[in-house]
Image: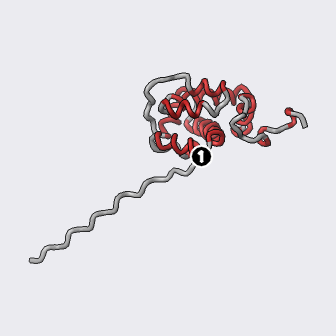
């Protein structure tokens, strides 16, 4: 079997994935009509994510991505912007000229694949550092911490 006969969904998601394979996986997983569209989505989502991540996590995540994709993630080096998951999607929609629905699709397509490349430990650390709402974008459950138990009502006073 030659490399051209391997379908993107058949290729394992590994840290040794090439940029070409990554774009093809994004194209397949996101059902994008062309490689160019998948490449544009990958670029937009990773660049936007790079603006949100603290330096340490951004650098570590870049280390598991193909070099070209890592450049998108690390293109901006400054204090991370603190957007919730929904604000991330809305910002991506405004930057790309898409709708919130298409931006959510694009984000989920890319970040779920990134999560497979990064592994559970790194994604857990990244999610701990990001505001609420990102877990679902990475294909994870959004667990919330239980609220503090309610204080018992004071006993009525005897008259």
In the displayed structure image, the side of residue 80 where residue 65 appears, left or right: right
Which percent across, then down, holds residue 72? Answer: 60, 25
Name the outermost residue toward the left. Answer: 159
Horizontal and vertical percent position of residue 87: 47, 36
6, above or below 148, in the image: above
Name the image quarter holding the N terminus: top right
Taking the spot 71% from the left edge, 25% from the top edge, the residue there is 36
Is residue 79 toward the left or the right of residue 39 in the image?
A: left
Tell me how many marks there are: 1
Residue at image mark 1:
120
Residue 105 in view, yes or no: no
Residue 104 appears in the picture as rendered: yes
Q: Residues within 10 Å of mark 1 (few under 14, many from 20)?
A: few
Residue lying farthest to the right in this orientation: 1
Secondary element at image label 1: helix
Write the residue at 56% across / 41% down.
122
Please tell me which residue is depicted at 89% across the width and 34% down the height of the picture.
2
Q: What residue is rendered at 50% in x and 32% in y?
A: 56
- The spot of residue 66 in percent (x, y) is 67, 29
Locate the C terminus by quadrant: bottom left
- Judged from this view, the residue extending furthest toward the bottom is 159
């Amino acid at each position: 079997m030659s490399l051209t006969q391997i379908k993107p969904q058949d290729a394992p998601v590994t840290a040794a994935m090439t940029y070409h394979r990554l774009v093809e996986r994004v194209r397949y997983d996101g059902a994008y009509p062309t490689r160019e569209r998948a490449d544009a989505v990958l670029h937009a989502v990773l660049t936007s994510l790079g603006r949100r991540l603290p330096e340490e996590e951004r650098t570590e995540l870049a280390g598991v991505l193909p070099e070209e994709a890592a450049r998108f993630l690390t293109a901006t080096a400054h204090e991370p912007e603190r957007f919730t998951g929904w604000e991330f999607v809305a910002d991506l929609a405004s930057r790309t000229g898409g709708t919130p629905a298409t931006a959510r699709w694009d984000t989920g397509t890319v970040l779920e694949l990134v999560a497979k490349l990064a592994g559970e430990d790194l994604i857990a650390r990244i999610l701990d550092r990001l505001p609420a709402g990102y877990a679902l974008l990475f294909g994870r459950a959004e667990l919330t911490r239980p609220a503090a138990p309610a204080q018992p009502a004071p006993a009525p006073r005897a008259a």
